[in-house]
Image (spheres, coloured by chain):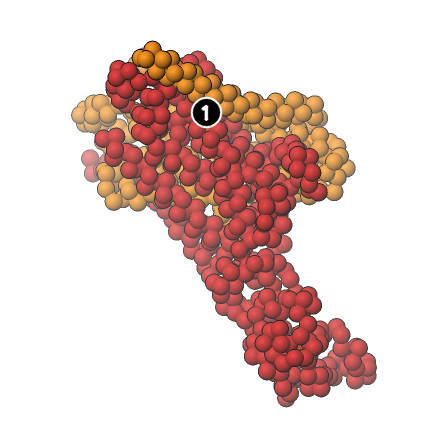
């Protein structure tokens, strides 16, 4: 009797495990297929001309150079805004506040901000930066909108980085008579720095692909010139992909360009992820050795 | 010494100011969203500066926005259908004036126009006249109908979203709310079983080497922009759905659900896998030591223990799906009608905002209506986020 129960149990386990294995490999297969599909189609469209030339003939020929430049400006602009503020917030939350109402409120609000859908950032950015502050559709308005979106990401990753610094380091520094800021700036931040940079890279990956926040704050369908000031509009990669697949006049002819643009976006995310992982690994080892 | 103290104070206040920016932003978002959204109520759905008038003997007291639309679409042709006498409705727009009066009567610079309108409304008992307010004569003999103000009822009970309709804009959010819920629920129904199976497999069944490959891949896919998923959906999923179900168009609620489901997978997998891996080793080992198989341990110990984490992951996935804009915009077909099956085109709230904000005049009814949609979306996602937080904080208490 006992052995039949045991073998039935084992058989059930085998069935369950195989089911789970098949489902998980199914999931991985889907995800792999998406990557494969986009990469294999995109690679045909990519050439040196594709990334260095202006679009021509109603987005059917030429390259996506202005969209790449536009995205670079937006990423740089949003990070100039979000990175210092995000890092400062995280330092304040983690190093300066005690567990109390202030910390609770700040953390709650950061969580709330992180949960707001990106299209709401678009609405808000348009209402505040474009209309109220009269920046118009501009790099400035778009960068600030994207920066606000990235702020919670920067705060969270920086907080994690600061938390990973052992308390004994802080105590040793304070015990030697250093002030709070001296401890933070000379001890805590240098140790946490690589992980903070990791957070920066990840938020760059996130920001470069966002479409909804830039729809009404900066993005342009086509511009014959590169921007001259922060009050100019720009083309941007994600918006470019959206317009040429949905509302262009030559949707079929611009298909290769769409594949190429999608691949460029994926490559940006890929590089950001790989770089972040590599940094984490490299510095993770180094800190342990000290 | 004193200088150092002052410097410390200054730095601390700079840090404090920086950390208050997220709070300020949230407050500003609420202020801007709701001030625009709420100003919608009290506005009329009929264009500003226009009048709806009837003959003075007409017993009708007012018309709702949807009645006006039905009348002008000629779906309603008798006054008794809207509560009046049994008379045929005769529509009159200002452009029709030439059918009734000669150019001389109207005048070269329309100086006689208001008198013509006045006489016309007075002479035709069944008339419903729609004309600019400036042609309303001082001694107007007809009856000007009060214009219905937009109310919560108009927004939440209205079954039609047609904000640029003339003469009465239709701003019923119901089809959009239903569309959003249909697509998101469909996405979760597809993603949850697959995601949970993958999470169980990764946390308790797979070899650590397999896990080390799978986890970064799944995290990588979480980082791919939604517009890229939308592009993939448009090229692969949409034609697939169209062929499978022999549909005239493949842009349907189902296509949206599939694309969103794929996008929700990484969230569900990572959150629930983390919850499962947090099951204390001692509990698992106790179960195994009592003679339970690995599978029994998983579904009797690991899954119940991590249930709240799994729930949090699922709700978080729904939240993401509800707020998702670009992918949905590209694959659901964007028809603002109440869906009957998942094989029909639908339109979600975020997609509506994204598609229409560009063409809505700032400060107009359409513009405000889109902000009101933003408010609805904001409230839905806020509730979802608070729900997730309360669930996961309960989980934290349990493990202590």
Would residue B393 appear left or right of B47 to someone viewing this image? left
> Is B313 in front, or is B9?
B313
Q: Quadrant of residue A174?
A: top left
In the displayed structure, would residue B171 be above or below residue A71? below
Q: What quarter of the picture does the N terminus of chain A occupy?
A: top left
User: Does residue B387 appear to the left or right of A243 in the view shown?
Assistant: left
| Above or below, A70 relative to B273 | below
Image check: B280 left or right of B354? left
Task: Name the residue rendered at 70%, 26% in the picture.
Answer: A45
Residue at 54% across, 61% down: B158
| Residue furthest out toward the top | A3
> Quick one: which chain is orange?
A
Say which residue appears at 66% left-offset and 25% top-offset: A42
Query: Who's red, chain-wise?
Result: B
Q: Position of residue B212 (x, y in %)?
A: 44, 17
Q: Quadrant of residue B78?
A: bottom right
- Determine the chain carrying the residue at label 1: B
Which percent across, then down, holds residue B130? Answer: 66, 74
Q: Secondary structure at mark 1?
A: helix
Is B268 located above or below residue B201 in the figure?
below
- Which of the pair B362/A176 is nearer the observer? B362
The one of B135 and A83 positioned closer to us in this rendering: B135
Give the residue pinned by disc 1: B198
Query: Measured along the vertical axis of the image, is residue A44 above or below residue B245?
Result: above
The image quadrant where one finds the C terminus of chain A is: top left
Residue at image point 53% right, 55% down: B174
């Amino acid at each position: 009797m006992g052995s039949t129960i045991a073998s039935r149990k084992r058989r059930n386990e085998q069935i369950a495990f195989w089911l789970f294995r098949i489902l998980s490999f199914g999931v991985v297969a889907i995800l792999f297929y998406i990557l494969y599909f986009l990469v294999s189609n995109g690679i045909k469209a990519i050439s040196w001309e594709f990334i260095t030339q202006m679009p021509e003939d109603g987005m059917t020929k030429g390259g996506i150079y202005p969209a790449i430049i536009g995205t670079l400006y937006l990423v740089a602009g949003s990070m100039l805004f979000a990175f210092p503020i995000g890092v400062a917030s995280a330092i304040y939350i983690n190093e300066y506040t005690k567990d109390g109402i202030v910390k609770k409120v700040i953390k709650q609000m950061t969580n709330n901000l992180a949960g707001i859908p990106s299209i709401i950032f678009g609405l808000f950015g348009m209402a505040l930066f474009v209309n109220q502050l009269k920046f118009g559709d501009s790099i400035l308005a778009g960068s600030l909108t994207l920066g606000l979106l990235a702020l919670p990401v920067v705060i969270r990753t920086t907080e994690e980085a600061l938390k990973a610094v052992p308390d004994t380091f802080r105590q040793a520094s304070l015990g030697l008579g250093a002030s709070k800021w001296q401890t933070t700036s000379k001890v805590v931040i240098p140790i946490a720095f690589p992980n903070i940079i990791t957070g920066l890279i990840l938020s760059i990956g996130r920001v470069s692909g966002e479409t909804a926040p830039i729809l009404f704050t900066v993005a342009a369908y086509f511009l014959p010139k590169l921007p001259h000031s922060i009050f100019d509009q720009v083309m941007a990669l994600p918006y470019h992909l959206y317009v040429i697949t949905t509302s262009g006049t030559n949707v079929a002819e611009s298909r290769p360009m769409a594949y190429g643009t999608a691949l460029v976006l994926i490559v940006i995310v890929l590089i950001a992820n790989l770089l972040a992982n590599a940094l984490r690994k490299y510095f993770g080892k180094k800190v342990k050795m000290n | 010494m004193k200088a150092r103290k002052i410097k410390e104070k200054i730095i601390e206040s700079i840090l404090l100011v920086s950390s208050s920016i997220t709070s300020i932003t949230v407050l500003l978002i609420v202020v801007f969203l709701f001030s625009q959204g709420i100003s919608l109520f009290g506005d009329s759905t009929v264009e500003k500066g226009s009048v709806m008038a009837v003959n003075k003997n007409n017993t009708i007291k007012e018309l709702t926005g949807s009645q006006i639309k039905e009348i002008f679409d000629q779906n309603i042709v008798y006054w008794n259908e809207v509560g009046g006498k049994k008379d045929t409705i005769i529509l009159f727009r200002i452009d029709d004036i030439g059918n009734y009066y000669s150019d001389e009567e109207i005048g070269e610079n329309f100086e006689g126009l208001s008198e013509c309108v006045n006489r016309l409304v007075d002479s035709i008992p069944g008339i419903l006249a729609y004309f600019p307010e400036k042609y309303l004569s001082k001694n107007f003999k007809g009856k000007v109908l009060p214009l219905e103000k937009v109310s919560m009822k108009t927004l939440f009970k209205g079954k039609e979203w047609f904000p640029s309709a003339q003469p009465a804009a239709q701003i019923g959010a119901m089809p959009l709310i239903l569309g959003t819920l249909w697509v998101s629920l469909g996405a979760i129904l597809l993603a949850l079983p697959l995601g949970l199976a993958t999470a169980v497999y990764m946390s308790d069944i797979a070899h650590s080497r397999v896990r080390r490959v799978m986890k970064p891949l799944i995290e990588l896919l979480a980082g791919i922009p939604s517009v890229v998923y939308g592009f993939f959906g448009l090229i692969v999923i949409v034609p697939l759905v169209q062929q499978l179900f022999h549909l005239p168009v493949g842009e349907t609620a189902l296509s949206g659900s599939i694309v969103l489901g794929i996008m929700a997978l990484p969230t569900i997998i990572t959150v629930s896998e983390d919850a499962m891996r947090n099951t204390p080793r001692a509990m698992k080992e106790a179960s195994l030591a009592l003679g339970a198989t690995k599978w029994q341990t998983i579904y009797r110990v690991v899954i119940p223990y991590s249930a709240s984490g799994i729930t949090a992951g699922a709700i978080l996935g729904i939240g993401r799906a509800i707020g998702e804009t670009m992918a949905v915009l590209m694959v659901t077909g964007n028809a603002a009608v109440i869906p009957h099956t998942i094989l029909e085109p639908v339109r979600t709230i975020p997609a509506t905002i994204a598609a229409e904000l560009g063409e809505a005049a700032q400060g107009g009814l359409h513009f405000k209506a889109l902000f009101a949609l933003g408010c609805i979306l904001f409230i839905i996602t806020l509730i979802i986020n608070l729900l997730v937080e309360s669930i996961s904080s309960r989980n934290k208490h349990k493990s202590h």
